[in-house]
Amino acid sequence: MSGGFRSRSESARHLKSDAKGTKQTPSNRGASHSDRKAQQQRRNRQRNDNNKRHQRQQGSSGGNKPNRKPAREHHRDLPRYVAWQALFRVDTENAFGNIILPSLMKEYGLSGRDAAFTTELGYGSLRAQGLVDAVIGECSSRPLEAIDPAVIAVLRLGTYQLLRMRVGNHAAVNTSVDLCQEVDKPKAKGFVNAVLHSVAQRTESEWIDHLTKNADPFERMALATAHPEWIVKVFRDSLGDYAISELSDALIADDARPRVHLVARPGEITAEELALVTGGEQTSYSPYGVVLEEGDPGAIPAVREGMAAVQDEGSQLIARAAAEAPLEGDETGQWLDLCAGPGGKTALMACLARIDGAHVDAVEPVPHRARLVEKTTTGLPVTVHTVDGRQSGLEAHYDRTLVDAPCTGLGALRRRPEARWRKSPDDVPELVTLQRELLAAGAELTRPGGIVVYSTCSPHLEETVKIVDWAEKNCPLQPLDTVDYMCGMQHCRAGENAVQMWPHRHGTDAMFVQIFRRSATPER
Ligand SMILES: C[S@@+](CC[C@H](N)C(=O)[O-])C[C@H]1O[C@@H](n2cnc3c(N)ncnc32)[C@H](O)[C@@H]1O
């Protein structure tokens, strides 16, 4: 274990060891990369308007409802049809791909190779949408915003198969033409056939070369890794000197399926035992973590019985640091989680609090998220308060406070396939204000000598090291060297004293964390 923690061993945390158109449009032809970006933004706006109109015309949110028959026999090519449904509903209903696709696969009874194909096609097409749309834009005789959303979804799937899957050109084009029939768009067959024939004229790398002839390296990287350019710049700025060698890996990691991390809840089961019963491996850093290569975590008895739960290893390290970083003065057993929903970190803190005879107040203003915290922490010493953390009305006496603030979530893009296309730099300033206010409130609620942990699931400098700089100047908080409390994690220092984790380096989400000591004398 790394230095800096109290002397109690991790094993003492374990109480129950026996626990159980082929043409380019005039507007696209020869357009520069930045022209194309402006066009893309216009398209996105118009597409949103079109989608709303389309939904209104359909009279419900379930646009192509007549086709949504769950019986297998209605569809000759069920895997592609299910992937189409997912793309269509993400586009027109703002559904989340990671929720809608598994639920559709279950509804239509897809399993084995079919399920694997649908997952690769559906998630891959959602992730690669920027690249796929740029290619379709070059090949279509109509601007993207003028194409029916049901047909766009067919084109995106077809283009993705041509560019990034081992599906032969002939099969990719023909199955897409057939899909038009299945989704009640038979008149689009000729158009889809023509566009996809044009797409098939180049490989992915030839398209990237073609589309980025006059682009700078960042624009090229954005297109090649299918990320919006602003996110590429956020990653570059956060990686700093390492961007030259690591930027591409960091972006590519957003396309990889994250391995499932489980937390062995202290006092219920050890990580060693959990690894044994699941066939997983203990994680590299968190003493409570187990990593699984595959399998459905919901089917694991230890998870069903509440002895273990799914939790990213980085989140485990943060909750552990909040419970373990050294206090000045006596522990009074009063801990606070100021942004608790849905409760993953609260639960780990509370397991450790139970062992120490401490109690956790958990604050979450969104009622359904507060209920999730209650559910996740049933039986643990936790009181949930459904209030705003900035005006919680709680008494200022806490030994330990976690501020796991709402953020852009740019550190967890691998978990939500379409997320990178939905987020916007315009979201950042409002979040930064909220993050500052919550951290200031957390500092006020903590007793002098206590610990305040600030964390985000984002590597954005505005949400991370700049918040720390601001807090040092404006709050009674003194940063501690957080690397010391990360269980030996290497190559994770950010700014002076903070930690930035990365999927491509550590296998965790890109979590940021700074541990502070509440100053004895407020400086304001
Ligand atoms: C990053 S999530 C916390 C994740 C949680 N710590 C976990 O590990 O499961 C941020 C949470 O802060 C909540 N939140 C938003 N505004 C808040 C506010 N003003 N005060 C307290 N919490 C807030 C959000 O609803 C969200 O549930």
Image (cartoon, rainbow, N blue to C red):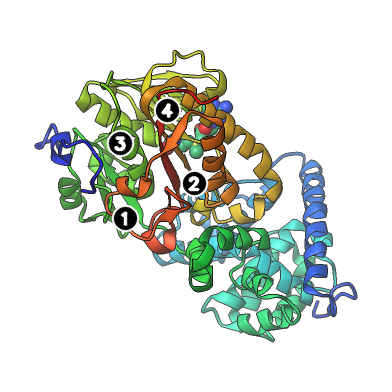
Q: Amino acid at mark 2?
A: Cys
* Label 4 sits on residue: 519
Q: How far apart are the two marked residues, 4 and 1, measured between alpha carbons?
A: 27 Å
In the rendered image, the quadrant that contains the C terminus is: top right
> Residue 331, located in which quarter of the rendered image?
top left
Residue 325, above or below 367: below
Cα distance between the residues tagged 3 and 4:
15 Å
Q: Is mark 2 within 8 Å of ligand 1?
A: yes
**Tag 2 or tag 3, which sits nearer the N-term?**
3
Asked if disc 4 and disc 1 are in contact, CB closer than 8 Å, the reply is no
- Label 1 and label 3: CA atoms lie apart by 16 Å
* Label 2 Cα neighbours within 10 Å, binned few <14 / some 14-19 / many ≥20: many
Up/down of 143 relative to 430, above or below: below
Say whether disc 3 or disc 4 marks the residue closer to the N-terminus.
3
Cα separation, mark 3 vs mark 2, equals 20 Å
| x 33%, y 50%: residue | 261
How dense is the environment of label 1, judged by Cα within 10 Å: few (below 14), some, or many (20 and up)? Answer: some
- Looking at the rendered structure, the secondary structure element under dot 1 is loop
Marking on residue 489: 1
Q: Which mark is residue 457?
A: 2
Q: Earlier in the sequence, mark 4 or mark 2?
A: 2
- The type of residue carrying mark 4 is Ser
